[in-house]
Amino acid sequence: MLSLDENKAELRKHQAAKRGALKSDHPNASEALMAGGDNLLALAKTHLGDEPLMVAGYWPIRSEIDPLPLMRMLADHGVATCLPATPKPETPLIFHQWQVGDPLIDGLYGTSEPVATAPIVIPNVILAPLLAFDQACYRLGYGGGFYDRSLEEIRAIKGQSVIAIGLAYAGQQIDTVPTGPHDAALDGVLTETGLIERQI
């Protein structure tokens, strides 16, 4: 019988191949995410009230769904945006203020990130890439723990005033994501077909 870690590792391989096929089959999916932008903002308001938003996106690599059109739309609506700088493994992400068009430098793992002099900020909405998700909004990530550690650190600083939204192709949904005691659910998942909110 596979352990939890072994089960996740096998599922990651399968889902990475599946996501690659979904990217090829849905070339306009990133633009379709923008249709759910208003629902995303409404969900943020439900959780955060009238607190000004600082939305953290990510620079897409491999077959990740591209958040940049959505981030551009949010910025056009007056929402502040930022990108993470990837630190050493097993440490939280560091977020720098950034919007589409600002300069970038090479980061770890083949990604890009803001220049080091860009102001460091604390987001209250984090858009997270993923390999798989389920109806309960549990996320299968890459195993580095960056997002879990980042959310834990922000919640320690700001109480509960941060939410996490996964960005994915609808076809990445599976029946059940294997989870352990330290895995936390997302607050929602936005796909090219709409927003799935976590049901508490």
Image (cartoon, grey):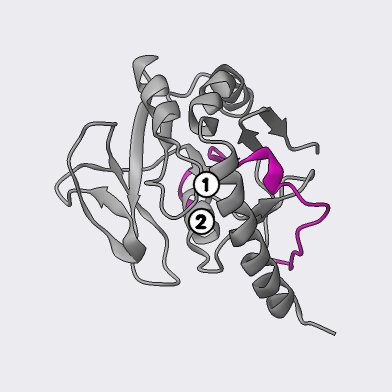
* Image quadrant in which the N terminus is located: bottom right
Q: Picture quarter containing residue 78?
A: top left
* Image quadrant in which the C terminus is located: top right
Point out the residue furthest to the left here: 117
Q: Can you identify the residue that label 1 sits on?
A: 128
Q: Nearer the viewer, residue 198 or 32?
A: 32
Question: Which comes sooner in the sequence, label 2 or label 1?
Answer: 1
Q: Can you identify the residue that label 2 sits on?
A: 147
Label 2 crowd (10 A; few <14 / some 14-19 / many >=20): many
Q: What whole-number distance in Å separates the C-alpha atoms at marks 2 and 1?
A: 8 Å
Q: Nearer the viewer, residue 172 or 24?
A: 24
Per the image, label 1 sits on a secondary structure element best described as: strand
Q: Is residue 41 visible?
A: no
Q: Which residues are magenta?
A: 156-181
Q: Are marks 2 and 1 in contact (CB under 8 Å)?
A: yes
Q: Nearer the viewer, residue 126 or 70?
A: 70
Q: Is residue 10 magenta?
A: no
Residue at image location 62% in from the left, 68% down from the top: 13
Where's residue 179, x and y in %? 74, 64
| Dot 1 amino acid type | Ala
Where's residue 146, x and y in %? 48, 61
In the image, taking residue 147 as reference, residue 2 lies left or right, namely right
In the image, taking residue 136 as reference, residue 113 lies left or right, namely left
Q: Is residue 51 above or below residue 22?
A: above
Q: Nearer the viewer, residue 8 or 89?
A: 8
Q: Picture quarter containing residue 192?
A: top right
Where's residue 37, x and y in %? 54, 22
| Dot 2 amino acid type | Tyr
